[in-house]
Amino acid sequence: MHTPSGTSLPVVPAALAPVLPSRYGLDQEPAPGAGIRVTADTLPGLESVSPADENSVWLHDALLGPHSADIVRYLSLARSTGGPVLDLGSGAGRLAVPFARHGFAVEAVDRDASALERLEGWARRIGPQVAGLVVTHRAELTGLRLEGSYRLALLAGAMVTAVPPASRPGLLREVAAHLETGGALALDYTAHQLPGLIAEPRRTWAFQVPRFDGIDEWVVARQVFDLPSMSERITYYAARTGKLSTERVVLTTDKWIVDPERLTAELQSAGLHIEGRRRHRIDERTESVLLVCRTDD
């Protein structure tokens, strides 16, 4: 489905063709108007944490697909630790609601009020037993202050990459201080090989979003790495074509590039040690890393 940077993009019918990144230049976003709607900074961490709006649900599902197996892995970990579970950057409940369905008490933390409303609505639709196990808390992860204690804390969906490096040690200390004895913090992130980033700091790929509602949606995605600031931005240029019109939407994700050695040092400073490390190779220069960390006491 994806076309790596450096290869030709698939031939897209003119009526469905997305607005290509080169049309806007390297450092600017298109202005709203002429059928273009810009939604900035709505997709922190893993792009699929929460859809920007109901029209982005299909794109959300397409981005989520390759990562959905993490639900099973995190549920398996929860069975070994027990609850309560702290889901940091919960979005619309991708993990929190399945956890509650399996009987775990969950506190879901997110900065997006509308995402938390969708989470609560989903839990209520399943039933009062599930809804009663979920508590939501609207807050930024930066400067987070917790009141409860937990057996398992999750920074899933690469949410750690949405936390500024300067704020990450404080967040890890806060989480560690509220883990019960024997509790665990689990987090995942995308690890990039530095030589690969230097050689190719800009990458582009294209894909068609699977939809079954009569709308054709094509996306061109542009990923730009900035090594001096250790940050990256992914911009999705989507064209959604129906019978009468085409809507062009621009969505962006801003992240921080994780330095594994620095992250390990920050975990140790917070009183956590890495008990398990799982790697999954994405391509020759990128892999997904899952860490399970335990309290030192």
Image (cartoon, rainbow, N blue to C red):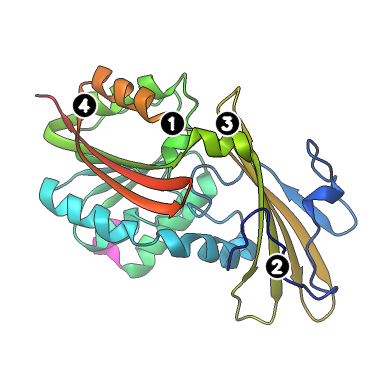
Q: Residue at x 32, y 48 (%)?
A: 279
> Distance between the Cα atoms at labels 3 and 2?
26 Å
Give 119 or 284, whichever is nearer the viewer.
284
Earlier sequence position, callout 4 versus callout 2: 2
Residue under pointer 4: 272
Left or right: 245 in relation to 183: right
Query: Disc 1 or disc 4, which is closer to the eye?
Result: 4
Query: What amino acid does circle 3 point to?
Result: Ser
Q: Residue at x 48, y 45 (%)?
A: 285
Mark on residue 231?
A: 3
> Distance between the Cα atoms at labels 1 and 2?
33 Å
Mark on residue 204?
A: none
Give 114 or 187, whichever is nearer the viewer.
187
Residue 125 visible in rendering:
yes
Query: What amino acid does circle 2 point to?
Result: Trp
Query: Disc 1 or disc 3, which is closer to the eye?
Result: 3
> Distance between the Cα atoms at labels 4 and 2?
43 Å
Splitting the image into 4 quarters, where does residue 187 fall? top left
For mark 2, give the secondary structure: strand
- Name the quarter where the N terminus is drawn: bottom right
Left or right: 283 in relation to 203: left
For mark 3, give the secondary structure: strand
Magenta stretch encompasses residue 129 = yes
Q: Residue at x 79, y 72 (%)?
A: 16
For mark 1, give the secondary structure: loop
Earlier sequence position, callout 1 versus callout 2: 1
Magenta part of the chain: 127-132
Earlier sequence position, callout 4 versus callout 3: 3
Residue 12 in the image: state x and y as whole percent.
Answer: 77, 72
Residue under pointer 2: 218
Residue under pointer 1: 141
Query: What amino acid does circle 1 point to?
Result: Leu
